[in-house]
Image: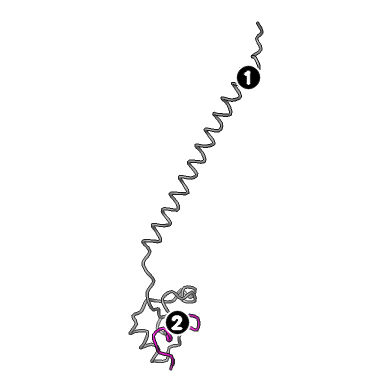
Amino acid sequence: MSDQPSRLELLRFARRVVVQQATAAVRQLDGWIADEERREAERRRGKERRPAPPGWLIQHGLNRSNVDRVHVGDCWAAAKSGRCRPASREQVVEALRHGVVACVHCRPDTGLGLLDNP
């Protein structure tokens, strides 16, 4: 009898090692999948809880006392300026009537039915 393991014993040992490594890899993948599912659920909940954008925005100047422009609530140009505040429809109409410029990108004057911006 030899002290050397048989070829069959070596193959069975190799199989156990492969199964053990595969099981560990599957556990790791399952963890990654669970983490990603959790992140997607958090993104979805955040999106659902996000308040709706305001209907209208008034963009203020650098000193916040001047009104520069009027925007529709989801205007990309207003989002880039960072100087906009939510406004009611009446405030926007009044601003347009007093000569405040309507945004050339979102055209709030058209959306309000005021085609002539004084």
Residue 38: x and y in percent read 43, 49
Residue lying furthest front in this view? Answer: 8
Q: Which residues are magenta?
A: 103-118
Q: Is residue 70 above or below residue 79?
A: below
Task: Name the kind of residue labelled 2 in the image.
Answer: Gly
Q: Is residue 108 inside the magenta stretch?
A: yes
Majority secondary structure of magenta residues: loop
Judge the density around disc 1: few (<14), some (14-19), many (≥20) Cα neighbours within 10 Å.
few
Q: CA distance from mark 1 to mark 2?
A: 79 Å
Q: Tell which of 38 and 77 is nearer to you.
A: 38
Q: Earlier in the sequence, mark 1 or mark 2?
A: 1
Q: Quadrant of the C terminus?
A: bottom left
Task: Name the kind of residue labelled 1 in the image.
Answer: Leu
Q: How is the image coloured?
A: one colour
Q: Which mark is residue 61?
A: 2
Residue 97: x and y in percent read 38, 91
Kindly indicate the quadrant of the structure image that contains residue 61: bottom left
Q: Secondary structure at mark 1?
A: helix
Residue linked to disc 1: 10
Image side of residue 82 versus residue 7, left or right:
left
Residue 111: x and y in percent read 41, 83
